[in-house]
Amino acid sequence: MEQRQYSVSLVTAVNKNIFNEHYTENGCEYRDRVLTMDTMNPNVKRVEYAVRGPIVQRAVQIERELKMGIKKPFTEVIKANIGDCHAMGQKPITFFRQVLALCSYPDLLEDSKFPEDAKSRARRILQACGGGSLGAYSTSQGIEMIRQDIARYIEQRDGGITCDPDNIYLSTGASDAIVTMLKLLVSGEGMSRTGVMISIPQYPLYSAALADLGAVQISYYLDEDNCWSLDISELRHALQEAKKHCSPRALCIINPGNPTGQVQSRQCIEDVIRFAAAEKLFLMADEVYQDNVYADGCKFHSFKKVLFEMGLEYSEKVELASFHSTSKCYMGECGFRGGYMEVVNLDPEVKVQLTKLVSVRLCPPVPGQALLDVVVNPPQPDEPSYDTFIKERTDTLATLAEKASMTQEILNQVPGIKCNPVQGAMYTFPRIHLPPKAILEAKEKGQVPDMFYCMKLLEETGICLVPGSGFGQRDGTYHFRMTILPPKEKLKIVLAKIKEFHQHFMEQYS
């Protein structure tokens, strides 16, 4: 076929949008595209997700350039931007992978290399799967046996407080369950539009989901000067301001915190529950880092446990959804996308709608469900895999605690960087001082100042961090989020490079 000759370049053609025009070529009629930037869902255009944003995209490009032999002042890109445990070198738990291998390829059940407790777990999981295969769909709420195991796990964690398996919903990681619950909560228009309270700094899943759903984000600021603590007076202020333009209906809490690494005290959790009860807010407790607690004097308290220990005045009144995942803690199995939520005091008719909503996506990944089952049902003291499991679990968490302490200590040695203690989770969120000349140059380039800083860091050192602006921060302050996941020796190199870069940056723009 004779090709059509264009008198303009491809770039000019795109700019002029000629491809969306109605024209005829070689007897064929071409009409305007149905889906364009003008006709697409406007909420999607408002979605931003900094953890995989421009910095990360540039990091991927640099990796390609290094493979092509293009010279850089470094030999590798170190992605300290995301909590992807195994990608950063954390080792899988042997028992978990043994059970998943057996479930994935049942012929291995005849192999003597696998311990009997792993085989018994695998057989039990496969018996609960359709056709005895991980490849079969499960019920939309998740395999019943696994929900029962999760309920027992929650009861043990919370000191015997009853958990109904019918209140457990398995999900594609915790993120899927969080978005599902937000879908149920969002309604109304104008002044009646749902408002959702989220902490600033926050994990961008929340702001992105609210933008996608067209909900109103109600920001409340954590107290950086007090180790990112939550102040009830700040909640009250944010709520009263929000009532002027929306209908606040939910309060989201991340504990331990992401990106800020704080662990809430029991007193703080009680205060939050009283606040939610008084203001008739639905509580959403993101507790995916519940095993990641490092600082002396800190302890994880589940919102459900505290709620029920506060008495019937609260335990029969406050609506709560809590979330957990296989992606974090000592497991770090991000790719299996295993997660669950437990709902408490949910209206029975709404629960029917929730079950209908999750049925639309058929079911969560069954391998992820299987992994979740062994996480909540690990080896017991009288089983052959117990000693290895306990050693691996303990070593993983101890190493994370050591790296949390080391990160805080080294960053606080750098003039112009202030880092709060990493009490829990997998990140640090230090404040960085940027000279006025750097801020001016960033604005001239159309960049947020801490994005400008992080991009220069990437180009000069190969270290990929996420600017604090992607998580939210008080005006006039600048931060970056960095994971503590790299192996200890590599983490030392990362911290040394950041120290050297920051000192050079300050000299350059002073």
Image (tube, rainbow, N blue to C red):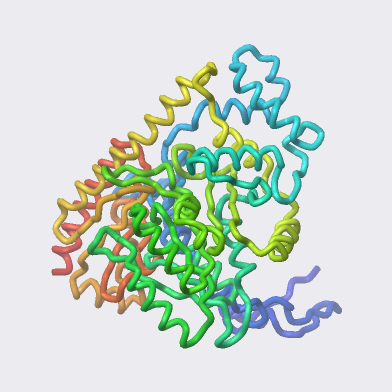
Is residue 106 rendered to the left or right of residue 199? right
Residue 28 position by quadrant: bottom right
> Along the line of sight, which residue is nearer the eye, 328 or 323?
323
- Please report the residue visible at 67 percent of the width from the left and 81 percent of the height from the top: 39
Vertical placement of residue 36 versus 245, above or below: above
Q: Where residue 280 sits in the image (x, y, percent)?
A: 52, 72
Q: Where residue 448 sits in the image (x, y, percent)?
A: 34, 72
- Viewer can see residue 261: no
Is residue 189 rendered to the left or right of residue 407? right
Residue 90 position by quadrant: top left
> Along the line of sight, which residue is nearer the eye, 136 or 20?
136
Vertical placement of residue 265 versus 432, above or below: above
Q: Where residue 312 sits in the image (x, y, percent)?
A: 52, 58
- Please report the residue visible at 59 percent of the width from the left and 45 percent of the height from the top: 338
- Viewer can see residue 466: yes
Residue 275 position by quadrant: bottom left
- Please report the residue visible at 17 percent of the width from the left and 58 percent of the height from the top: 504
Q: Where residue 25 sits in the image (x, y, percent)?
A: 80, 79
